Image (cartoon, helix red, strand yellow):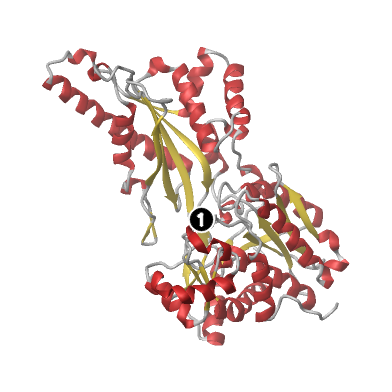
Amino acid sequence: MSTDMFIQSKSQMLATLLELVSIDSVSLSPGEKYFPLRVEQVLKSLPYYQKYPGYVVNHPTSDGRSILTALYKNNLAEKTVVMISHFDVVDIEDYGDLQHLAFNPVELTRELHNRLDTLPEDAKEDLISGDWLFGRGMMDMKCGLVQHMSLLEKAANEDWNINLLLVAVPDEEVNSVGMREVIPRLVSLGEEHCLNYTLYLNSEPMFSQVPQDNNHYFYTGTIGKIMPGALCFGKESHVGEPFSGMNACWMSSILTNEVEWNEELSEQVNGVMSPPPTLLWQRDLKKGYTTQIPHRSASLYNVLLMKRNPVDVMHEMKKVAIKAADKMEAFIRDKYRLNGLDESQLSHIHVYLYEEIRAYAVKKTSAEYIDILEQSIAKETEGDIRDQTIQIVDQLAMLCQELGPMIILFYAPPYYPAVNSSENECIAELSSSLIEFADTKYQERIHPVNYFNGISDLSYAGLHADLKDMDIYNDNLPGGEKLYSIPFKEMAKITAPVINVGPMGRDAHQKTERLQIPFAFETLPKLLAHLIKIHEQQKND
């Protein structure tokens, strides 16, 4: 095997990173489509892939983008580490008049020295230290991808007795189309090459646990995210006769007041509390201005997960919605009494799950009619898939309006299942070895954290829950797989423990996004190589 090394030294890795950062791969942009083609070119310049060019493949996604996989294979190896990264980045509008430098870290960092007074104090200190480079994608997460490319080359040149499969996906920042669509391909690649997936490695950057945090971390899981929604269906009325109707926007506000920062929708694991839920989107569904009160309103909520699944969240959401409905009824009753109105005209506010409304609509019409309705919205209307989800609920609510006033609970995309491998024997051993190695060799103290506190594609690295528990998600997702699908069955076939070991970075998705260079290209490559070598030596379960 040739000893030529192209992505190993600090200068080589930094040069590769700067080239990849220079590619404007904002989610859903032309640059996102070009990016994996360039990575394919870089990898195929390596001697190993000149010998095995078929091991580097760009797989098309259903929406015209592509997923890159690159395999290093040792025919005697019993284990395969899947190295996951994403190459899309968020937009650069926040850079203002420096947008033209957002993808040029060297020039951007140089220019920021002329604007020290405009920077937050922590960013100013990092800039002055000379150890950080600023730019979109430096930390989130093209550095992680370069680390994985380097590991492929190192494994090939040193003939490691383990298989490595690099997986670089688009769309992590939006709907994770790339990761969701690569899962069936991982199943087929495993069958084609007789691969036993024993570990998923991500190299998303470390996130500070608190402000001004200089500690180093690695993660043995990833926090989950789910987005429950609620459509409030009231009763129409002219604004001059408000007591004859029920304002859906008001209903949504009462419900949101019950959901916002509600500890019942948070959870605690090993003394760590998940961030509380919060409202992401809320509006009435009335088209244009009229003097009719809005009687349909929808809201979407961000709920972060640690151990809970869709069954748990929907159960808690229903309890909260019933409580909110009781408060609405009590408020209306008081107003009726205050104004001397007939309380017998009061309406009970029902709480339904989407699957219940859909079943009612099917009985009222037919399964074929509802399927066509969902499909026409899912496939023929333009716009964000969350808008399409709400349109489907709205259409069914109007079809079943005799059930109102009501609150219809549903799920909207995306869904990222929570994963926690901290109690896995393999991960426990790797964690101990990693901590000792970093301390002994580099005098670096790194701390294990159960959950990566930024959303990551590790959520789809196998299914770490009961497959049956996923049914309630699909059953309460308007439009179902026509609109948004997660390959739960395929995920269950390739489940393995996860770990995230990545560079030190700060301010992801901000104009001060930056990467600490010494750790990224001096210490981190050694930590990752050590991790894989230790896993190579571990006994199979």
Residue 293 in view: yes
Residue 433, above or below 478: below
Q: Nearer the viewer, residue 199 or 367?
A: 367
Q: In the rendered view, would you say 218 is above or below 30? A: below
Q: Camera-side residue: 366 or 172? A: 172
Query: Horizontal and vertical percent for residue 375?
Result: 61, 26
Give the quarter of the figure containing the C terminus.
bottom right
Residue at x 67%, y 75% (from the top left corner): 15
Closest to the observer, 317 or 16: 16
Please report the residue visible at 41 percent of the width from the left and 67 percent of the height from the top: 209
Q: Determine which quarter of the picture holds residue 426.
A: bottom right
Q: Nearer the viewer, residue 287 or 541?
A: 287
Left or right position of 225 against 434: left
Residue type, mark 1 in image: Glu
Residue located beneath label 1 in the image: 93
Q: Is residue 68 left or right of residue 407?
A: right
On the image, which quarter does residue 270 sit in? bottom left
